Each structure stands twice: as C-alpha cells, then as structure tokens.
Amino acid sequence: MNVISLSDMTVFYGPVRGVSGVSLTVGEGEIVALIGAIGAGRSTVLKAISGLVKPREGELVFRGDDLRRIAPATRVRRGLVQVPEGRRIFPSLTVRENLELAGFGVGGGRAQRRERLQAVLERFPLLGDHLPRLAGMLSGGEQQVLAIARGMMAEPKLLMVDEPSLGLAPQMVESVYDLLVQIASEGTAVLLVEQNVTLAFEITNRAYVLQQGEVVLSGPSSELADDPRVVAAYLGRAAASPAAGS
Amino acid sequence: MSWNVVFPDIVAGLFLGAFLALIAVGYSMVYGILRLINFAHGDFYMAAAFVSYAVLGAVTVGTKVNWGNVIWVGLVTMIAGGVLAVCVERLVYRPMSRAAILSLMIAALGVSQILENGVLNIPSWGSNYLPYPVTPPSNGFSVASVHYTWTQLGIVVIAVVLILAVYWIVNHTMLGTAMRAVAQDRAATTLMGINTDRIISLVFFIGGALAGAAAVMASLYYGQINYLMGFSIGLQAFTAAVLGGIGSVAGAAIGGLMLGILESVGTGLFGAQWALMFAFGALVLTLWVRPTGLLGERVGQRV
Amino acid sequence: ASASKPHAASPYVVGVSEPETGAEAQAGTEIYDGERLAADKINAAGGVLGHKIVLKEEDDACDPQTSVNAANKLVSLGVQAQVGGYCSSAAQPAEPIYSRAKIPNIQAAANSATLTQAGYHNVFLVDPNGVPESKAAASFFTKVLKVKKLLIVDDQSTYAVSIARLTAAALKGTSTEALPIQAVPDTTQDFTAIVNTARSDGATGIYWTGYFAQGAEFVRQLRSAGLNIPFTGADGSVDPTFIKDAGADATGTYATIAVLTSFLTGSAAKAFDSGYTNAFHSQPGPYSAYGYDAMYALAHAAKNAGSLSGPKVIAALHKVKFSGLTGEVSFAANGTRVGAHFVIVEVEHGTYVLAPHQPPA
Amino acid sequence: MARNRSALIALAALAAAAILPETGQGNYVMSIAVQIEILMCLVLGLNFVVGYAGMLDLGFAAFFAIGAYMTGLLSVDLHWPILATIPPAVGAALLGAVFVGLPTLRLRSDYLAVVTLGFGEIIQEVVTNLNQTGGPEGISGIPPLRIGGLVVTTNDGYYNVFLVLVLVFVAVSFRVRHSRLGRAWLAIREDEDTAQAMGIKVRRFKLYAYMAGSVFGSITGSLYGSAFIAIAPPSFGFNESLLVVMAVSIGGIGSIWGGLLGAGIVVAFPEVFRQFAQARLLVFGVVLVLIMVLRPQGVWPETGLGLDRAARVVAQFRGRRGEAVAARHRAAGVERTP
Amino acid sequence: MSRLAVDGLSLRFGGLEALAGISLDIAEHALYAVIGPNGAGKTSFFNCLTGYYRPSAGTVSLDGRDITRMAVPDVAALGIRRTFQNVRVFPRLSAHENVLAGAHLRSSASLLGTLLGTPAMRRAERALADEAQRWLEYVGLADKSRVLAADLPYGMRKRLEVARALMGQPSVLLLDEPAAGVSSVEREELVAVIRRTWESGVTVVMIEHDVELVMQLATRVAVLQRGRLLVEGSPEDVRSDQRVVDAYLGRRRG
Ligand SMILES: Nc1ncnc2c1ncn2[C@@H]1O[C@H](COP(=O)(O)OP(=O)(O)OP(=O)(O)O)[C@@H](O)[C@H]1O
Ligand SMILES: Nc1ncnc2c1ncn2[C@@H]1O[C@H](COP(=O)(O)OP(=O)(O)OP(=O)(O)O)[C@@H](O)[C@H]1O
Ligand SMILES: [Mg+2]
Ligand SMILES: [Mg+2]
C-alpha cells in the first residue's frame, strides 16, 4: 500500500516555479530516492509533503487522507516526518531537549518519550555523551546525527531525509544508512534525497530523477544506476562515492 | 549612611520592582520568541488598566474595596490583556513574520501609538487622570518605623506567585521548551509536530495577562490611571528584561526587582533627578561584567 | 444692536496653540476649553467690535518642533492673534514666528521668565511667573507653617523647576531650611523613594511644584507611609482631579495660587464654574481660568484699540487693565503679568477654600 | 539597473528640492521642510550605526543633543560664531561615542540597544538637571549662522543650508559605503565571527561606526540650535531617537535614499494629519502599522525600489529561475535568516 | 621547513576534551589533510589555529612565530585564511563584495582619501575590484559577481568562501570540508582549484570526509580521534592503517 502518493503536484515560490507536475509514490517498507541536480526541486517536494510550502496544484494523499486539508504540525503527528535540509536543530536547546521536543510534538507521553529516547541513544551512542550540552555546540557531523535522531523520536510512518550524509564521516554514513534499511524493514516508508547518488542507489528500491522541477526518469534503482543518462549526469566519471574507489 | 535609611528604600524599590518584574517577564517572553522589542507591551498594561477601571467602576459603589470584586475583575483584566496581546500579534506581527526585527519594532511603535491615542480619543477617558474606583484600606504593619499596608504585601505576594507559575511553565514543561524552540527556528518547530502559531499566541497571551495583572495591582496601589501610564514603565520593563538576560523569566523578574531597587536607592543617595542615571550606570556595569544579562542567555553558537 | 446684523462682519480669527496630544494633553484641553467659554461669551455679547471670534486650534504637543509647526500653520491660516500656550519650552521657539507676523502672542499658561527675555514686544504672559508665587510660598512656610526643613520636589518641567528654585532661593537665610531639591521625571507614579528621602532627611514640610496628577500620588504615598507633615502644592496642583485622586489624603493640604479672593467665594467663579461644567461636562482645570482671562485680555485690548490689526492690538494690550478670574489683569512693559495676587488655599470637605492664615505680604 | 533608476529618481527629487524655496511656499511648509532635512541628516548619521554596522541604537538623539548644546553654550555664553562651535561640538560628540562604545561593544545588538537607550536618557537627564545647560528651559537666543558675510536668518536660508548638509552627508555616505571602512561595517553587520577572519577588528570598527554617527549627529545638532534659536531638553529625548530609527526603517534599513524618504514621511505625516485634531497621532499610528505590514522591508530598501516585481515575472517567463530567486531576495530586502 | 608547528595542543570544554595534546608539523609545501570521525576535534583544531578558540595548553607557531593566543584578526593579518564548515558567506552582500571583504587588510585607505575620492585612492580601489573579479573567475563564479550570496546554491557558496579567503593573499589556507554537499560535477572543479592554489605556493590544510578526494590530493594526512592524533603519514600509509579503518573508514571500505 502506498504511504504517500503525489499526483501532478506543482509548487510556486511567489512567481518562481519550484516543481511542476510531480507524481510519486512511496509504499510501506520501501526506500525511494529522489535525485537531481542542485536546484532541481528535491527539497521542494519534501517541503510540500510536510506542508512548509503550499502546492498550487496536485493531490497529496497520505495513508488515504487528503493532505491538503491537514495542518503541517498535524501531519507530523500522524507520522509524516522530515529531517530537513541543513539540520535545523535547535542550537540553544540541549541535545536532550531537542530529542524530547520531537517526542513531545507528536504527542508522546513522558514514559513513551523516555523509552523512545533510550532506543534512539542505543542507535546513536555518540549522542549519549552529549545529552546535557547545547546542541549548537556540537560538531557539524554530530548535529547532523542529532537531526536524524530527532526524526526517529517522532516514530515516523513516512520518513523523509534530505541529504543525510552531509558532513558525516564514512562510518557514520554507514550507521545512518543501516538505520534507514532497518526502519524500512519494520514497515516505515522512506523518501531519501541524497547528493551522493551512488550511495543512495545502494539502499533504495526505486528512484525518481528530477530535472528543473520535473520528474524525467523513474524506476528501480538498479536499472537507473545503469541508465546512461543517470550515469552521465549524476554518477559521473569521477564516481563521487568514497565507496567506488575501493 | 545607615541601614535604617537604606532599608526603606530597598523595600520601596521592591514594590515598584514587583510591577516591573511582572511586565518585564511578559516583555522578555515576547522578546525571546520573536526577538521583538515590543514597544506596545507597556500599552497592553495601560489598556488593561482602563478595562479594569471600566469593569470595576461598573460594579463598585462608593470607593470601599470589595475584595471579591477586585479578584474577579483582576482575572477578567488578565484575560483582556492577554486577548489584546494576542489580537495585536495576529493582526500586526504575524503578517510581518518575515520582516526584519527593526521593522517589527517600528510596527510595535505604531501599535503603541494606536493604543495610546485610541484611549485618548475615547471621550469619557481622554487625557484625564482618572481616579481608580476603589481605594484599598491603609491598615498594615510597620518595619523600621515605616508603615506598609497589607495591600502592598499582598501585591508583592501575588506578583511572586504569578512569576513562579510562569517560570515553571517556561522552564519545566515541554510547552516551555517548545516556546524556546520557536524562538530559534519556527519551521523546524513545525516539523516537530508543534503548532507554532499557537505557541506564539500563548506567549503573547501570557505576556498580556501578566501586564493585565500588573495593571490592576498598580492601579490599586497608585490610585489613578492615565493613557500614558504604560510607555515609561514599559521602557523600564524592557530594560529590566535585558538586564536579566533576554528570554529568561527568572532574569526578567530579578532584573525588574533590581531596577526598582536601584532607582529607589539611587533616589535616596543622589536625589531623584539622578536616579535614572544611577540605574543605567548599574545596568552598563552589569552588562560589562555579564554581556548577556544577569542570568545570561543560552546561546548555542560556535564557529 | 450690531449683533443682529444678518450679514455679520468678517470673523476675528484667533489661533490657539496648545498640547492636544502627549503628556500635557489634558492641561492643553482645559486651557482651550476656558478660551472657548470666553469666546462664546464674547460672541454672545456681540463679538469683538462686531466681529465674531473664530478659534483655530493647533496641537503643539508640548514639543518645540511641533509648536513651531503649529505656529507656522496658524500664521499661514491668517490668524490675527495667538491665545494659548502651556509649555514654555514649546512656546519659546514659536515666539519669532508670531512676532514676524506682527500679531499678539498671548500665553495663557506658559510663564517662564525666559519667554520675555528675548524682548519680543508682542508677548504677554497671563500666568504670572514664579517670582511672586515663590515669595508667597516662602513667606507661608516661614511665617505661617513655621516649617523647619522643607523638601521641595519638582517634576523637571520648566514651570515646576523655576518655582522650586526660586522658592529655595527665597528661603535662604530664613528660619526654614530648604533641603536639596528633588526632581522626579514627569512620568513617575512611584514616590516611595521620595517619601523615604523626606523621612530620612527629617523634612517637616513638603512643597510640590509639579502638577496635580503626580501631586495626588505623592500625597497619597506620603500619608500611606505614615508621614503626616504638611503638604503644599504650587498652582499646578490645584485641580479637582487632585482632590478626587488623593481622596481623603487631600484634606488639609495647601496650595499656592493666584486668584482673586472672589474666585473662591464670589459669583464670577461660580458662573465660570457652572458655565464650564455645562459646556464641557467636566470641571475646569487649574489653567482654564487663565485661558479664559487670556481671551478676555485680547478682546478688551482689541476693543480699546478700536481695531483688529495686530500692531494696534499689541499696543493696546500693553495698556489693558481689567478684573479677570485670576485677579486684576495687566502687563508690565516686558509682557509679564502684573496685578496677580497669590494666596494660599486649603482643601476642606472636598473643595478648595481660602486658608485661614495667609502669609504676610 | 535598479541602482541607476534609484539614482535617477533621487536626482529628480533633488532638483525639485533645490527649487522648493522659489515656489513661494509659506513659512509653514518651509519650516516643515527644514525639519525634514534635519531628520534626514540624523538618519544618515544613524545609518552608519544601524544600516551599515548593524547595531541597534536607541539613543541617537544624544549626539544631536551634544551638538546642539555645545553650540548653544559656546555661542550664547562665549559669543562664539556658530561655525566655530562645530569643531568642539563634534569633539564632544566623539568623546560621547567613545564613552558609550568602549564598555559595551562586545554586547550583542539587543543588549547594545538598551545601553544606547540609557545613554540617550542620561544625556537628556543631564541637560535637564544642570544649571549650566539652562535646566528644563534650555538655551535661548542662539545667534544666526554666519558664513563669511552671509547671515542666515530665514527659513528659506536654513532650508538651503540643510539641503547642502544633506547632500554632503549623502555623498559621504556613498563614498564610505564603497570603501574599506564601509565594507568592514557591512561584513560586521552580516557576520561578526566571519568578519574577524578577514582581519577586521570588529570592536574597533563598531566604535568607528558610532563615531561616524556622532559626527553627523552633532553637526546637525549645532546647526539645528542656530536654526531654531532656542533648544530645550524635550527635543532630545527618547522620542527623538525613536523618530530617527523610525525613519530609517520606514525607508529601508541601510538604504540611503530610503532613509531620506523615511525622514520625509515621519515628519510630514503627523503634519498632514493635523486635520484630525486630537486623533492625528492615532491616524499616524495606523498608517505606520500599515506601512510596516505592507512593506516590512521599507518603502525604498537598500537593494532597489522593488519595482523589479515586473522583472521577476519576466524572468519567470524566460525560465531564468536563478535570477528570479535573486530578485525575490532583493525584493524581500532584509530578511530574517533562521 | 615547517610552516605550522603545533605542539601539545589541548582544548577543554568543561569535562569534554576536544583536543588532547596534539603535536604535528605542517610543512611549507604540504597539502595537508585532517580526517577523523565526527566530533573528533578537527574543526576545533582549525579554530585553535585561527584564534577562535583559546587552547587550554600547547602552542601553535607559524613560521616559527608563536601565534597561540592571538586574536582572530591578528592571526589573519599573519596570512592564515580559512573557510568554515557551515558556510559563512555574508548573505546580503553580492558575491563580488564578499570577495572584496577578504581584502580588508590589503587596502590602506586613509579617511581623507576615502572622503575625497582621490585619484590614487580610486585607482587602488579599482585594482582591488578587478582582482576580486579574477578570484571569482578562478573559482568559477565569474558570472555570479552581482548575485547576493544568499541566493547562491550551497556548492557555489562554498567556492565563494574559497575566493574570499584567497583574496587575502594567504600563506596558509585552511579548508573545512570543502567538498561536503558539492555535486560530482562541481567536485572536479573544486579539486582543480585546490590543486592550483597549492601549486601556487600556498600551504593548504583541509578537513575532509571524502576519502577519495583526500587520497587524490593530499601529500600528508593526519587522523584525529577523540581529540588525539591517531595516525599521521602519507595517504597510502593512513589508508591501510587498521586503526584508521576501524575508527573511521568503516567496514565497506576495509
Ligand atoms: N524559499 C524559496 N523561494 C523562492 N524560490 C525557492 C525557494 N526555495 C527554493 N526555491 C527555488 O526552487 C527551486 C527548487 O529548489 P529546491 O530547494 O527544491 O532544490 P533542491 O533540488 O533541493 O536543490 P538543492 O538543495 O541542492 O539546492 C530552485 O530553483 C530554488 O532556487
Ligand atoms: N564551543 C564549543 N563548546 C562546547 N563544545 C564544543 C565547542 N566546540 C566544539 N565542541 C565539542 O568538541 C568536539 C569536537 O568538535 P569539532 O567540531 O572539532 O569536531 P569535528 O572533528 O570537526 O567533527 P565533524 O566532523 O562532525 O565536523 C565536539 O564534541 C563538540 O561538541
Ligand atoms: Mg535541497
Ligand atoms: Mg567539523
């Protein structure tokens, strides 16, 4: 069953077109990649799903509900969670507060929050040492991890992650990707925006390629990885992935 | 200079400080969440005073205090102050949510003009100094040969209780954490599943309500109200909020008390004309030593 | 007879510059109302030389720049005189404007000595300046109240500071010691610090030279702190609002004010009072009577001059003499009011009455 | 292109300004015009601090006061010619700038705002309470300005004097904006930490901003005293400081042309609303709020008049998305970046 | 000869040891890379070199001169320039003005010259402006000169930072994760820019998580872990070091 499905969605920023006529679906337990060049509109798709921008046209259906009638905050409470571009952690809250707030926002009780926090910390022991510290003081990579951990606190049904590998050490990239694979296997739908396309194709089932705000290609990742157009535009001769060299 | 001379000054400062603290806490919260120097905040206080004047006037016969009346009128005034603040936020500040802080501040000045001159243009209020409908009794107690009334004591106690309540909400509940989160990143807070508009409204409501409470207490204590009563106390409250550390409830409260005491002691030491200078001198010194106010501000910023 | 002419003569356009907004809006309104009352009465009696007075009011906000604008505006509207004014600091920069326009500039309530120092021939101050008032006050404190230590408090306004300083100076070498003057900002509601100062300095009397609203706060807080020393206000304190706001604490307080004895007791005052209350649904303020007298001064002068022309009326104003609400109205060569007589009033049963013991002249 | 258009509009306005006295306006209009010019001068001074260096200053009237009082005292008590009083006035103002600046420059903008506010209040308090400065009555009888054999006594005369002053200030503002000094200020405004990495000594340059502002403020104050003959404390209080800030942000923070326009609005509107009598400030408040809500970036922002809405639409049709985004940012002017 | 000598550098934040006794020498002709897990202390290391952080112990010297406790602008004056991990361009200034800001220490404008706009002054300004434009070209942003920095995409902003740093004519250039978030196409340009800069005689030190890029460019690599220097050596040595694989590279790259 599709967790999210967009059909013919068009978003404008004032007079500027962000994306147009985008249709895509993510099913339960599926990991889907959204790739494209800078400014292609990937983040715009995520923002529209979260409700941070209002689509001008098109339908958005989340688990059978018409999203357009649902306020952004409510969407999150129903399990539609985004780890946004640029981390957007709360720098002047402690790491613990950052995490707890995510649990609070989705209506978790105190006990539930604690339990959830425990689980997240097990996954990212790195954060455990830093709980009482202000999030803004963390290193860049640590902040990125916090942002992802915060997304996990919200118990997503659909998790959208925007460039999660940015600033992460190779080993940490692995943990994060392992996590995505794991939660997908538990039934969560994952929509992944990733600059590092090679890396993305390693874990995703399907992918959509955005160009200038429009979906120009889509299909199973394994097929796309061999598509000459994709290779030329995104994988390139240099093979941007650290993995490719070995 | 002896203790007997300074002690009454300190106590006197506490009374002024209690009002300042109440207003400053609201100021500080609004400031904290929108980074807005809300010049209209003092006028929320003023407008609330007029509301309480009208309501209390309508239910009071003579000038004898009926404490039951005062209490419910107080509650009504707090709600009125809160609602006024929320309305201003909705109508003016919210449409400007992407504007520069300075532009917001100027809009706040506009609101302040509207509120003040609005009251000025209401015929039966106008520019008059209106005597408050009730006068509290003057019985009380004496310390160091200075007489204090029970009303004064009660006012301070209520102020402290209100501030503690707000302190608890802001610092010990997730709602308070959410307020601080909104201040830092609104869109990200939405992504946590939190309705940020509602949080901002709540902050304005609390700020307005505290100003309302201060209005009733100050009107009882000073006995008269006027359409300009809010501006200068608002400015002092703003100063107190900064002195305490922007966004910090406890800081604002302590800042308010401190400013009250400084002005009062400064008057005692140097005469009233130099009290303000003394208070600001102390402010500069404080900020020199602690650049983010008494209780500091948690700033999570690094390079 | 001339009043019944159907095609009435051109109006006598008189400008009024006073604060309508800002902290002094109330005083401004009260002066204006006093002037309106006078103008209405004059008009009802046929106007000035058959010309009906038409008032043009402009806001000076008690602010020098705004006052200059108001003056320029009035002059550009072609007013033939200016009657009004409350804040000396606002009145001052406007002086040259009226002078250049060659129209009388009658200040109803602004009364700083500096207003006459620039030497403008067309300036007249209906409100006598602080010298006679401070003399009366000093004499009252030393001879009648026999105050040992007097605490003088002003509100930093031109008017209040000048009375405060003059009084302190007048007390030099007398049996009354003037403590250092305290000046509170005119926005202060809280006087407890001053009250404490009074107590710790051992003051045995207070002279408040600011305005009534703060005066009421002051006396209340003085009494509520248990300090029952005599409280005297200057004329700015004399206002029904003072009595209303200070409530029971107003009783027994004194004030220095320039009025004819008949103002407090006589029929002229009663008529003024009831006329004012009928017209404006509020009681006259401390300066309403000055506004009233200012308007009459103009009317009398124009009548004496037999002309509305500015220079002629100005010349006549220098010689005018009549019995007004605030005493005999006439002006010294520099435009300062003469003939004012200061008395001490006391609050009793919710009204001002003449204090039983007046200071010797 | 937007800049050329701005300059063109400004030139047209200048031409109109230059011939204003010849059009036979009455004293009323001319004296308001003079006040507008005075506020323009102050705005240009504050612009160094707020617009360029990005520090909030709520006590700018202090420098205005220092200039006016120095001139008042020296010219009335010591009979100095007005022009001769300007250097000491500027000197005193510079001292004042250092006095507020030194202990407080490491403060963040919000905290700085309060300190400057305090400084403004203190200066007003001092001149109100000192006998030497004439107390609340201030100083009167300040002689007219003499330049060579020319004695300026009329409104028209002062109008021209201040017009020249405004032009000089504008020229200086532009020169400084595109100099090392201006770039350092803008860098500080944008990001202090990063500015330091360029070798910019942040505190020193912030102090320069105050000093530059104080120079403009005090010169304006000096001439103001002479133009108005009398000065008194109420003209130099918090409200005056607010007016300057108001003009700056109505016009568009950091924008020179905008600031001038803002000064015009702030002075002229309350006058235009005189017909509303006691409600005039109420109307002004409503208009103020409307302006800020409708054009939060100011009427004439730093980055152009915002007439480029048309340009944006055109860009969209051509599919030049990048440029359209740039236009959007420009139109938004000063934005709060999260 | 070593250009930057770091000796026993330690940095504490309360109980947290961000750097613990780091000693290393960066040679004048080095293209030096610093790698390590997240939170290892790499950025803090840069911050200590540039005066943003005051180390709690140890010394840093540049060309033999102790710069340990110098203020940020003073360090910059000695020729050290850097970029930031979280790009810090001046958002409301154009790309060109961003680069010009980097020339702060190079223009010696007198106040009078500025106000009067003397010909000499104008010439000097002109020269700087032209040079700024050339640096923009150098990093491939020639056509973005008038665009506000805020309107540039992430990858371009990173390059703008490099241009700004180069405008300061540094002898040492510190780059904090220059390749993060940069697309594969841009990455090639970036490599070329870094290499050219290094070849022109600038000592380049970079923090990077893109191991391939490090291997491609660096002459020497230091690996930090929990504030300590884990390994230092040539790229090949480091890559094959088992400790580095365990702590940093992870299994896929083993
Ligand atoms: N707030 C905004 N206002 C105006 N235009 C915007 C805004 N955000 C994005 N755009 C424009 O919309 C288009 C799509 O942007 P989006 O952020 O979705 O791209 P992206 O694929 O995520 O690229 P990247 O993250 O690499 O910049 C771009 O042209 C961008 O310039
Ligand atoms: N100003 C500071 N206050 C408190 N802690 C800090 C501060 N700066 C750095 N730290 C801490 O020091 C440690 C090292 O941080 P640093 O930024 O140097 O890591 P890094 O190696 O650059 O990591 P990344 O690869 O994630 O960028 C982190 O745990 C960080 O939280
Ligand atoms: Mg994106
Ligand atoms: Mg780092």
Image: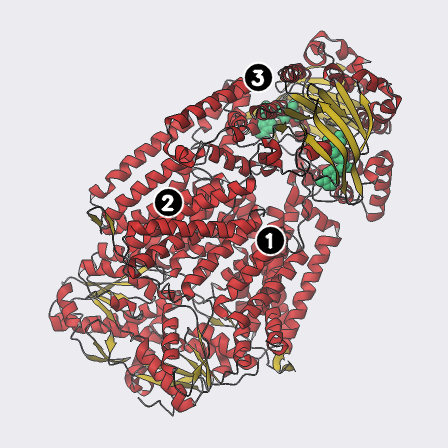
- Towards the viewer: D252 or A106: D252
Q: Is mark 1 within 8 Å of ligand 2?
A: no
Q: CA distance from mark 3 to mark 2?
A: 42 Å
- Disc 3 is placed on an element classified as helix
Image height of A57 relative to B192, above or below: above
- The answer to whether the residues at label 3 and label 2 have Cβ atoms under 8 Å apart is no
The numbered mark at residue B129 is: none
Q: Residues within 10 Å of mark 3 (few under 14, many from 20)?
A: some
Q: Are marks 3 and 1 on the same chain?
A: no
Indicate left or right for B93 with E235 as reference.
Answer: left
Q: Residues within 10 Å of mark 1 (few under 14, many from 20)?
A: some
Quick check: which quadrant has ligand 3? top right
- Towards the viewer: B124 or A122: A122
Foreground disc of the pair 3, 2 = 3
Q: Which quadrant: the C terminus of chain C?
A: bottom left
Q: In which quarter of the view is residue C256 placed?
A: bottom left
> Which residue matches tag 2?
D41
The type of residue carrying mark 1 is: Trp
- Disc 2 is placed on an element classified as helix
> Which residue matches tag 3?
E138
- The answer to whether the residues at label 3 and label 1 have Cβ atoms under 8 Å apart is no
The type of residue carrying mark 2 is: Cys
x, y (%) of residue E100? Answer: 52, 27
Q: Residue furthest top?
A: A228
Q: Are marks 2 and 1 on the same chain?
A: no
Image height of C38 relative to D331, above or below: below
The type of residue carrying mark 3 is: Tyr
Q: CA distance from mark 3 to mark 1?
A: 45 Å
Image height of A67 relative to C75, above or below: above
> Which residue matches tag 1?
B288
Image height of B254 relative to A112, above or below: below
Q: In which quarter of the view is residue D164 placed?
A: top left
